Every structure is written in C-alpha cells, then in structure tokens.
Amino acid sequence: MPDNENRSVEVEDQREDLGKIEISPEVIEIIAGLATVEVAGVGDMHGNFASGVVEKLSGRRYGRGIKVDLTDDGIIIDVQLTMNFGVSIPDVAEKVQSNITRALKRMTALDVHEINIHVVGIHFELKDKKETGEE
C-alpha cells in the first residue's frame, strides 16, 4: 500500500462545476481526536514515540493517538487511548466510535469503513495529598 502522506480523500457529494474538494488524512485525524476526547470516560489519547516527537516540535496534540489509513475499501481509523478507571470499556468504546462517525459525517460528509479502538491503559485519579491529609 502506498504511503498516505500525499494522499487525500475527495468529497464526492459536490457540484462538479465549482472544482473538487480534497480532505487530507491529517484533518481526519484532528476531527477524530477531538471527537474522541469529548466522550466521558476517555482518560487520554496515546501516541507512539514518533507522534510524541512531532507533538513536542510542533505543539500539535489533536491527532495524537489517531491513525488514518486510506484504503480501497474506505477510511480505516485506529484510535489508541486510555480510559478512566471504573468505566465500562465496551460502552465508552462504542460511544467513541459513534462520536467519530457523527463528527466526520457532519464536518466532511465522509463515511468511515472501520473505527478500531485500542485501549492501551487505564487512567487512575490521584487524590490531592492535601485533600486526604497525607504528607
């Protein structure tokens, strides 16, 4: 499969006499990332070493933990995240999938072939030491 760096998605539902509309995978990553963190129960997005370096150099965090593949079957999105302790992982994962689908449909009119959720950790709330009285 060729690298997705120079690929973009054409929006098909448009008037032909005005020109074409293309959406880069980075835009899809940002929309999916924002839709993910909106869901209650999501602790944080998880990225790899390369995304961490890019984040430190560019200051960009929105697409962290999101990978977009443009395939012949359609758009495949992989989401790596941590969830808050105590939530129902299947319920929150389903809400993330629904929220991403809804946001992409509303903002880009694109349909997604797959949204794969990878839970890579659990986020525990640490109580402030002053609140618990511990030193």
Image (cartoon, rainbow, N blue to C red):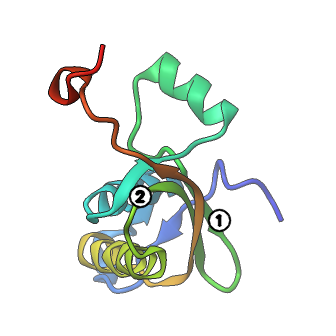
* Disc number lying in front (2 or 1): 2
Disc 2 residue type (three-letter) = Phe
Q: Secondary structure at mark 2?
A: loop
Distance between the alpha carbons at the discs numbered 2 and 1: 30 Å
Residue sitting at the far top: 135
Disc 1 residue type (three-letter) = Asp
What residue is shown with label 1?
69
What residue is shown with label 2?
85
117 relative position to 29: left or right: right
Q: Taking 47 as reference, is 109 above or below it?
A: below
Tag 1 or tag 2, which sits nearer the N-term?
1
Residue at the (58%, 29%) spot, across then down: 52
6 relative position to 15: left or right: right
- Quarter of the figure with residue 11: bottom left
Q: Secondary structure at mark 1?
A: strand
Which class describes the residues within 10 Å of circle 1: few (<14), some (14-19), or many (20+)?
some
Percent x, y for residue 57?
51, 17
Residue at the (40%, 23%) spot, across then down: 59
Q: Taking 122 as reference, is 119 above or below it?
A: below
Between 121 and 17, the one nearer to me in the picture: 121
Between 56 and 27, the one nearer to me in the picture: 56
Percent x, y for residue 42?
37, 58
Q: Quadrant of the N terminus?
A: bottom right
84 relative position to 71: left or right: left
Percent x, y for residue 106?
24, 77
Q: Taking 80 as reference, is 14 above or below it?
A: below
Residue at the (31%, 75%) spot, across then down: 99
Q: Taking 12 as reference, is 122 above or below it?
A: above
Between 15 and 45, the one nearer to me in the picture: 45
Residue at the (31%, 80%) spot, across then down: 105
